[in-house]
Image: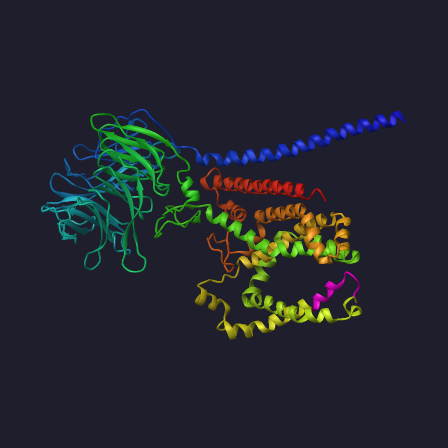
Amino acid sequence: MSSILDRAKRLDGIMHWVITLGGMTIIAAVLGILVFIGSEALPLFRSPRSRELAPGALPPGAALAVDETGRGIASLDPRTGLAALGDGQPITPAASAAPALPWTAPTPLDAQGRCAVVDAQGRLFFLELAWSAPSGEATAPWGLEARWTGAMPAGNVRLLAAHPVEGGGLADAGRWRLAALDAQGRLVWAETEASAQAALAWKPLPLPEGADATCAAWNPKGTLLFAGTRQGAVHAILLEDAPEAAATVEVGEPVTALGFALGQTSLLVGGARGGMVACQLIRAEGPAQLQLFHRFQPLDGPVKGFMASQRDKRFLAWSATGLAVDHLTTERRLFAAPHAGAITAGALSPRGDRIYAAVAGGPLREWSLDAPHPEISGQALWGKVHYESYPKAEYVWQSSGGTDDFEPKLSLVPLVFGTLKGTLYAMVFALPLAILGALYTSQFASPGLRDIIKPLVEIMAALPSVVLGFLAGLVLAPLFERSATVLLVLPAVSLGLGLVLLPLWRKLPNRVRLGWGTGWEVLWLVPLLAAAALISVKAGPLFERAFLGGDFRTWLLSAHHLTYDQRNSLVVGFAMGFAVIPIIFTISEDALSAVPRSLASASLACGASPWQTAWRVVLPTASPGIFSAVMVGLGRAIGETMIVLMATGNTPVLDWSPFNGMRTLAANIAVETPEAPVHGTLYRLLFFTAALLFALTFLLNTAAELVRQRLRKRYETF
């Protein structure tokens, strides 16, 4: 006997350690997953880092251009011409027919390294810098070629802006459009082919009386000229058959520089007091408007120029003494060098990771910038942001677009809203059915009927969510769209039949009412529900023609301005409710069945009816367990992915209407994962949404446990 007891103790000790080890392993695994998710999301919120590098031996110039690697720099100076540097070594640019030095001030270099100059002989030249990658050396500076074209009389003007316009066919090689100030200081423009030799025909541009232009910039198509004035305004001038002023915006200080962010949709405006704003041309109802929609931290002194990154919406701005890098969308300052010296020109590498400043009387200064996620900020994730081409600030999620210059819109508000919306509609459908069904099964149904209902409901939990989503998207959604009035008529018909049959039910003799047996009365509702469904289907089109103008969707749009989407919140709530009902029903039924029968017997003995006993005694006593069931079902609905993914249009909209869809956090992870490059902004943001889902369910479960404990203490005296 002692040997058996000793063996049992040893086995008990072994199992104790095995179970403890298994539990600790599970806890460690969950914590490890959480730590990994957090470590992948945390770099999103890391502050930008910068450091100054060794100075380069490049003479200062009026304009700088940088190659793709960020190591090849070209300097354009009106007195000395074109110089280039790469990895500390001079680059000799290939050039032919270069203009005679010195040049009058060239137009600002655009993002592609193009500008126009007037040489010492008064001839107009166009310059295009072409960088070519070296073979077999991906990190080496690119070779530089300077292509000069033009050599035509320019006239007595001061160039402000030049822009190449692509040709319209095989015979059209393209042309250039220029903006300048004539000898009287008036704003004029001209158009010419790059290979032309005839003198330019300058034509005046309309500006308000007394406006003095100081700088100009062309839109990408060359059809619109933006002109900044000394009076503190920016004018958009449309060039068609007859140039006309299209729109104007006041910036509050004399305009000294104009530029574009990536995509050339947002116009960057710099002022004489260092102020910087971004404007955009909005064509909504009525005439076009030039809208000021972003404002940035000012610089010290007048802004001299801008240069945009070719990867994202960051841009460089510089004054005579300092320079800074800001991000258009978030308005974050990523880099600042407020006392960089007497700056003559600045440049930002195409990747946005290197910054250069040409300093008068000193070497070229260079900084590195590490800001991998500049589009992320608290305001961008949780606040309203004014995006390009939007008339006002909004909450928007749109992570990718059709072009490289797309502005990511990464607000999490529509996703959190969609998660709550989908959960709400699912719980509205599931809670009454699950809890009342559990109450009936545990308190009123006969043991034989209970043994049938409970296993059937529990089998529903075995249905894969992908099957429910498939049925919801391909069967329920078209069905609801074809006969949407059923959703309105069914409650009314069911209520009418209930009011008619309820008095009759009370008058029926017991042998009829109990014909199925005690606890089986619910079977009489089966023909009632079948009749209600049949009447709804038959009467739905009649109701639609009589009261809704013949079409439910048209009536919604015309009468209530609601759009009916085929895959909407009703379909999601119906399908997700079926996924949630088994969980809530099973836990609630167990909690209700666990209530001591002595409580119900005492209530019945005091004269309470079975319904009063169930509602006033049994249900409150089981409320801690029912509340836990609701919270478990809520967590299941919040984390549901496949049903939401397949049964909605996955549109991240902020609208409580049940007739359109939504996008949830879980479905967004599934949708966006194939589009997320490893360690990119979207990749890390998806990890952040996963951590957000974990935190949301953790808070819900914690709150549920606290409430459950309070309810348990309240009713533990029973």
Q: Residue furthest right?
A: 1
The picture places residue 463, in percent across and down from the top left corner, at: 66, 53
Q: Nearer the viewer, residue 238 or 99?
A: 238
Q: Position of residue 715 (x, y in %)?
A: 68, 44
For this rendering, which residue is in front, 577 or 498?
A: 498
Which residue is nearer to you in this view: 198 or 636?
Answer: 636
Q: Is residue 74 left or right of residue 214?
A: right
Residue 618 magenta-highlighted: no
Please say if 657 is above or below 108. below
In which quarter of the view is residue 37 placed?
A: top right
Which residues fall within the magenta stretch? Answer: 515-527
> Measured from the top left, where is residue 34 in percent x and y?
56, 35
Residue found at the far front of this picture: 606
Based on the picture, tell me whether residue 522 belongs to the magenta stretch: yes
Residue at (44%, 35%) from the top-left corner? 45
Q: Quadrant of the N terminus?
A: top right
Residue name at image x 12 percent, y 45 percent: 157
Q: Looking at the rendering, which quadrant does residue 717 occupy? A: top right
Residue 175 in view, yes or no: no
> Is residue 490 among the parts visible in the rendering?
yes
Q: Is residue 461 left or right of residue 328?
A: right
The quarter in which the C terminus is drawn is top right
Residue 373 position by quadrant: top left
